[in-house]
């Protein structure tokens, strides 16, 4: 992607918790009453409490910590991060932020896996957001606050335990469950194919979702993904009742269903989602980064030689309990912002009807062919923005986001490539998404509404090492092709983006600060991870090069070690309770063996 087109998209940090030991007929599993957060929504792009007090001492026990605590921090003038972030925002092309379905789009990630499926169909972008909400905590800190006095209170150990789904359990939060206390409650029907809204209650003028984590209502796609997991639990509960007769009370069935739901979800995180984003192939599981970390350990016992899966973690070395590394939370895992499209089709009804024509996006002075991710107007049918009841006929057809088996032309929609470019709407997010903030007197207040600016400023304030230093610390040769160019920075002052108020004088100063004589340039870790991904090349169906298909060596290894390390740190995860376990629920093709993917989980959940 050209320097002048550099742009990003989505997601922030917050944390999950662990459980007490609940046992069902000898099967150790997490307690069915998980701790969760019930705080109101926070501005999008804000970081979690505790980040500004991240310890740099050798202690690794705590809520937030550092993977590379001995490396020097990256430093520069904060104004330079504002200029760089603004330059990463993709500008409209011919007045449009997107292209029509079926028209070639150079920003799309069209790389494919060995079975012919897209590596990253658009559904994985929002699954990544869902995962983020499961393992991270309450985002209440502000970019403009220098410290948070409550930063080390309310510690929670991050886990893949779906407390965003189960809340504190049916006894403590009965309103998110059906009357039977065993299945989760759903809201209004949205269309003819069984799509449902979340259960909602009137709060003032708004219809607030009754969910374990309010952030899972922040847009219409992740909201309906939350609904899919509600349906998944309900179907698994019925599955246990019908198929596993040894669980003969509803309480035991609930706990068993909860375990199966969590374990299948954990499997998808590690063996499907993670493999796709780091360059592995879930349909060739013996090779790649994940296989390297999860090498079986052979041991001898009565009866012969046996294999046991135990993670080999080189850089994420927690001691007593897992912590959330800032290098992951504020840099590497934010690769997902670059994968977000500016707009989406969500079903054929809207594609052929209301959104079959051009639509204005006032804050960007541009138009869209598909439904924009948000606009600065609050009407529910203007965008995919959330925190409101989903209109009728706005149910997500997951064939538009995943390979469910009913292949349709030009579907599913691909994610965008992972590169230095961030989708235009994320360069000027509405007030209701970001909240009012000001960063610097030299700039318009609107620079705080640019997501890449927020990411870079946060990384600077938290003292994260440069990407080049992290690469060296991992024993890798820093990629000399990764750099910040004056041509890239010049994009910050383009006439098409006057709202950010960045003039050429500020751009010139940023160039001197970040580039200097160009002999030994250092770059922020988040930027390094994105540019590194942009340099990863694979072939498409026609043998053409596709860049930005997946994360590179630094970003990929950090993300892989943290996700697997967090799973290993949960005493009730399948990796600890039954490390050689494999998914037992049916796949899309009806089989009970072979790779198990997000599409398999979704199809089972919705009964498609």
Image (cartoon, helix red, strand yellow):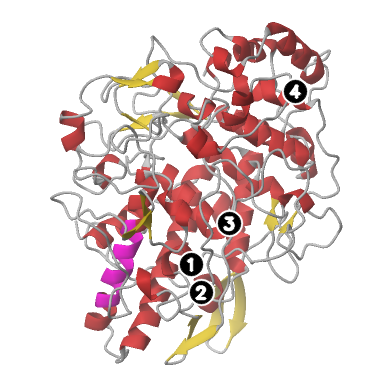
On the rendered structure, is 28 left or right of 80?
left
Which comes sooner in the sequence, label 1 or label 4? 4
Q: How far apart in space, not on screen, are marks 4 and 3 (Cα)?
A: 33 Å
Find residue 591 and report its image quarter. Answer: bottom left
Q: What's the magenta region?
A: 227-238
Q: Residue lying at the far front in this picture: please name it.
A: 204
Which comes sooner in the sequence, label 4 or label 2? 2
> In the rendered structure, are the residues bearing label 4 and label 2 in contact, judged by CB atoms less than 8 Å apart?
no
The label nearer to you, 3 versus 1, is 1
On the rendered structure, is 376 left or right of 584?
right
Report x, y in % for residue 50. Answer: 72, 55
For residue 251, the mark is: none
Which comes sooner in the sequence, label 1 or label 2? 2
Name the element at disc 2: loop
> In the rendered structure, are the residues bearing label 1 and label 2 in contact, judged by CB atoms less than 8 Å apart?
yes
| Residue to which mark 3 is pinned | 563
| Residue to which mark 1 is pinned | 163
Question: Crowding at label 2, few (<14), some or many (≥20) Cα neighbours within 10 Å?
Answer: many
* Vertical comparison of 363 with 414: above or below: above
| Residue to which mark 2 is pinned | 34
């Amino acid at each position: 992607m050209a320097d002048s087109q550099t742009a990003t998209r989505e997601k922030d940090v917050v944390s999950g918790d662990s459980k007490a030991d609940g046992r069902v007929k000898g099967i150790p599993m997490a307690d069915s009453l998980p701790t969760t957060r019930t705080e109101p929504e926070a501005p999008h792009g804000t970081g979690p409490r505790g980040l500004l007090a991240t310890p740099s001492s050798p202690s690794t026990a705590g809520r937030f910590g550092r993977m590379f605590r001995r490396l020097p921090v990256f430093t520069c003038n904060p104004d330079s991060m504002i200029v760089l972030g603004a330059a990463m925002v993709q500008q409209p092309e011919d007045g449009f932020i997107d292209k029509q379905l079926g028209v070639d789009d150079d920003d799309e990630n069209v790389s494919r896996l060995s079975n012919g499926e897209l590596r990253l169909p658009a559904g994985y972008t929002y699954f990544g957001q869902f995962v983020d909400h499961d393992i991270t905590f309450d985002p209440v800190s502000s970019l403009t606050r220098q410290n948070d006095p409550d930063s080390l209170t309310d510690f929670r150990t991050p886990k893949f335990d779906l407390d965003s789904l189960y809340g504190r359990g049916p006894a403590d939060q009965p309103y998110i469950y059906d009357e039977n206390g065993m299945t989760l409650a759903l809201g209004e029907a949205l269309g003819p194919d069984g799509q449902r809204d979340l259960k909602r209650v009137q709060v003032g003028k708004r219809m607030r979702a009754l969910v374990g984590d309010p952030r899972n209502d922040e847009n219409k796609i992740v909201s309906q993904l939350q609904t899919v997991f509600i349906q998944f639990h309900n179907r698994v509960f019925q599955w246990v009742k019908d198929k596993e007769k040894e669980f003969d009370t509803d309480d035991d069935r609930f706990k068993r269903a909860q375990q199966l739901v969590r374990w299948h979800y954990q499997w998808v995180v590690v063996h499907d989602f993670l493999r796709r984003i780091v360059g592995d192939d879930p349909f060739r599981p013996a090779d790649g980064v994940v296989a390297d970390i999860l090498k079986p350990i052979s041991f001898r016992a009565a009866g012969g030689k046996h294999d046991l899966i135990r993670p080999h973690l080189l850089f994420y070395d927690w001691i007593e309990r897992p912590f959330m590394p800032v290098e992951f939370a504020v840099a590497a895992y934010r690769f997902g912002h670059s994968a977000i499209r500016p707009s989406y089709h969500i079903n054929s009804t809207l594609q052929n009807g209301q959104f079959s024509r051009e639509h204005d996006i006032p804050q960007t002075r541009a138009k869209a062919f598909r439904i924009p991710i948000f606009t600065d107007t609050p009407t529910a049918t203007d965008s995919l923005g959330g925190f409101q009841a989903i209109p009728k006929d706005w149910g997500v057809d997951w064939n538009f986001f995943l390979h469910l088996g009913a292949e349709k032309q030009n579907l599913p929609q691909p994610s965008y490539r992972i590169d230095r470019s961030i989708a235009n709407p994320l360069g000027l997010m509405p007030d209701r998404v970001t909240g009012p903030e000001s960063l610097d007197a030299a700039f318009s207040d609107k620079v705080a509404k640019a997501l890449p600016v927020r990411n870079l400023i946060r990384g600077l304030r938290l003292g994260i090492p440069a990407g080049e230093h992290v690469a060296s610390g991992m024993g890798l040769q820093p990629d000399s092709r990764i750099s910040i160019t004056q041509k890239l920075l010049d994009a910050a002052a383009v006439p098409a983006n006057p709202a950010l108020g960045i003039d050429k004088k500020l751009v010139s100063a940023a160039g001197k600060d970040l580039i200097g004589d160009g002999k030994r340039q250092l770059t922020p870790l988040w930027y390094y991870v994105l540019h590194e991904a942009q340099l990863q090349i694979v072939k498409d169906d026609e043998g053409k090069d596709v860049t930005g298909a997946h994360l590179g060596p630094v970003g990929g290894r950090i993300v892989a070690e943290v996700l697997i390390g967090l799973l290993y740190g949960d005493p009730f995860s399948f990796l600890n309770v039954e490390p050689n376990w494999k998914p037992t629920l049916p796949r899309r093709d009806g089989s009970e063996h072979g790779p198990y993917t997000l599409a398999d989980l979704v199809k089972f959940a919705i009964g498609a």
